[in-house]
Amino acid sequence: EKHFTIALAGNPNSGKTTSFNSLTGSHQHVVNYPGVTVEKKIGYTKLDETKVELIDLPGTYSLTAYSQEEIVARRVLIEDKPDVALAVLNSVALERNLYLVLQIMELGVPVVLALNMIDEAKEQGMTINAKKLSELLGVPVIETIAKTGEGLKTALAESIKFAEEKKANKITPLVISYGTDIDLTLDKLSEKINQYPELINQYPTRWLALKFIENDFDIKQQIAKQNLELHNFLETQVNELTKHLQTTLGTFPEAVIADYRYGFISSLMRNGIVQRKENNAERIARSDK
Ligand code: GDP
Ligand code: MG
């Protein structure tokens, strides 16, 4: 008998809890994390003979250490190691919602996209090319309407199928370029991190390096606790990079990183992922001219 764990990830109000409730019904309970007020909801469902555990992650826009929700969401992804993340996206704000998806992909967690609220998108005259998005990102993309339950069973089935595929051929985390300066530092830090097997068992190497460059206090603290010498080495390298970026660009690494992530998404979107029909009011306004 097979058993899978799926984490529902997404921005606040994207429809995670509605999806979670629809899939698990009353088979759910709440777990509290030590030291934080954010709770973790666990639910159960079955697809044919496969038992599925679902985790309703707190809603976040990112996976930095900006809020308790973000720290909890990424700790679950890193420590509980779900087989797959089902990203529940608000289709109406697809571009913004993809920002989180990239970060889950950088973590090396297999991700399946639910284009939720597709009813709203259609109502607003938007068409989303799910097939193209799926090809470009290399992940399954399914249209859903969590409010009515439409597409949720398909999303569940695709998530399990994708998790099985990814188990068979180990997943490689998404690599985004952050420009020459940051990329070179990422390589240097990664080389050092790779000398510590106990760390690369816990985190993807490049992700850990990226968190140091982003000056992520939570991750830096974890590493300092485990290996102070490594922490200090990484910090010294990052300080040099930070000084360099400040003198050349007048900005901080975390801002450069965010810019490149948005740039990555913009170039995705330029492949005609979203088509907008003009609505009646716009058409009338145009013909009036
Ligand atoms: P969460 O913050 O991600 O857990 O979002 P919720 O599940 O609480 O949903 C936020 C709101 O969106 C609720 O009012 C839902 O009824 C509504 N909602 C969820 N899914 C859909 C959908 O597919 N279509 C529409 N129109 N509304 C939805
Ligand atoms: Mg919720």
Image (cartoon, rainbow, N blue to C red):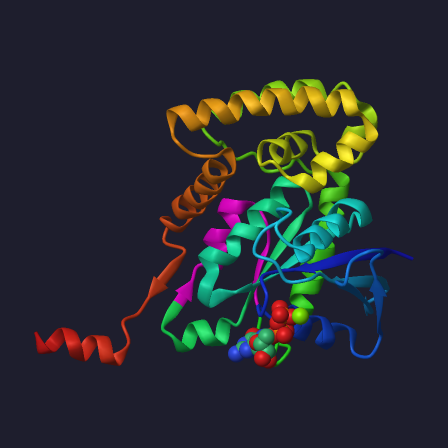
Residue 151 seen in the figure: no
Q: Quadrant of residue 213?
A: top right
Name the residue rendered at 51%, 27% in the picture.
242
Q: Position of residue 167 (x, y in %)?
A: 77, 43
* Looking at the image, residue 137 lies above or below residue 4: above
Which quarter is ligand 2 in? Answer: bottom right
Front residue of 137 and 232: 232
Residue 35 seen in the figure: yes
Locate residue 50 relative to residue 60 in the image: left or right. Answer: right
* Looking at the image, residue 199 lies above or below residue 13: above
Quadrant for the N terminus in the image: bottom right
- Residue placed furthest toward the left: 289
Quadrant for the C terminus in the image: bottom left
Check if residue 138 falls in the magenta segment: yes
Name the residue rendered at 70%, 54% in the picture.
73
Q: Position of residue 179 (x, y in %)?
A: 45, 28
Name the residue rendered at 85%, 56% in the picture.
34
> The magenta stretch spans which residues?
127-143
Q: Position of residue 128 (x, y in %)?
A: 43, 62
Check if residue 130 falls in the magenta segment: yes
Q: Position of residue 94 (x, y in %)?
A: 47, 60
Name the residue rendered at 43%, 28% in the picture.
246
Q: Quadrant of residue 166?
A: top right
Front residue of 89 and 241: 241
Locate residue 41 relative to residue 215 in the image: left or right. Answer: right
Locate residue 231 relative to residue 106 in the image: left or right. Answer: right
